[in-house]
Structure formats: structure tokens, C-alpha cells
């Protein structure tokens, strides 16, 4: 094996590791976004139902 070949491959793995590390750091933020969406989904749905029923009946 050529040492230049090994050095080049190690450099590629270092870059890969940095990129994967950044992706893994974003996972908790992404999951929090999903949880927040579903937590608020019920509130948004009930607000939409209230608004649409108020428009049709004229009553609150």
C-alpha cells in the first residue's frame, strides 16, 4: 500500500466524520420540531373547528 493512498483515505474519513457529526447534532432539533408540531396540532385543529363553526352559525 502506498502511504499517500492511506493519507488521502484518512482525510476523506475525517471529512465524512465531520459531516456525519453535524447531521447527528441536528437530530434532536429535528425531533423537537416534530414533537412541537404534534403537540400544537390539537390546538390548531380545535381553533380551526371553532372558527369554521362560528362562520357557519354566527354563534360562538
Image (cartoon, rainbow, N blue to C red):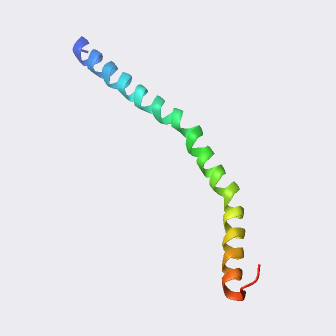
Q: Position of residue 34 (x, y in %)?
A: 61, 51
Which residue ends up furthest to the bottom in the rendered image? 57
Q: Position of residue 7 (x, y in %)?
A: 28, 15
Q: Is residue 17 left or right of residue 1?
A: right
Q: Residue at x 46, y 31 (%)?
A: 22
Which residue ends up furthest to the top in the rendered image? 3
Q: Nearer the viewer, residue 59 or 26?
A: 59
Check the picture and name the quadrant holding the C terminus.
Answer: bottom right
Q: Residue at x 38, y 29 (%)?
A: 16
Q: Is residue 57 left or right of residue 32?
A: right
Check the picture and name the quadrant holding the N terminus.
Answer: top left
Q: Quadrant of residue 5?
A: top left
- Picture layout, residue 23 above or below residue 10: below
Q: Residue at x 66, y 83 (%)?
A: 55
Q: Residue at x 41, y 31 (%)?
A: 19
Q: Position of residue 43 (x, y in %)?
A: 71, 62
- Picture layout, residue 9 above or below residue 57: above
Q: Quadrant of residue 48?
A: bottom right
Please state the total of marks drawn on the protein image.
Answer: 0
Q: Position of residue 56 (x, y in %)?
A: 68, 87
Q: Nearer the viewer, residue 18 or 4?
A: 18
- Picture layout, residue 17 above or below residue 42: above
Amino acid at each position: 500500500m502506498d502511504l499517500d493512498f492511506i493519507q488521502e483515505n484518512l482525510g476523506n474519513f475525517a471529512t465524512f466524520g465531520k459531516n456525519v457529526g453535524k447531521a447527528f447534532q441536528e437530530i434532536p432539533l429535528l425531533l423537537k420540531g416534530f414533537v412541537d408540531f404534534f403537540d400544537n396540532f390539537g390546538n390548531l385543529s380545535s381553533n380551526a373547528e371553532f372558527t369554521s363553526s362560528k362562520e357557519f352559525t354566527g354563534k360562538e
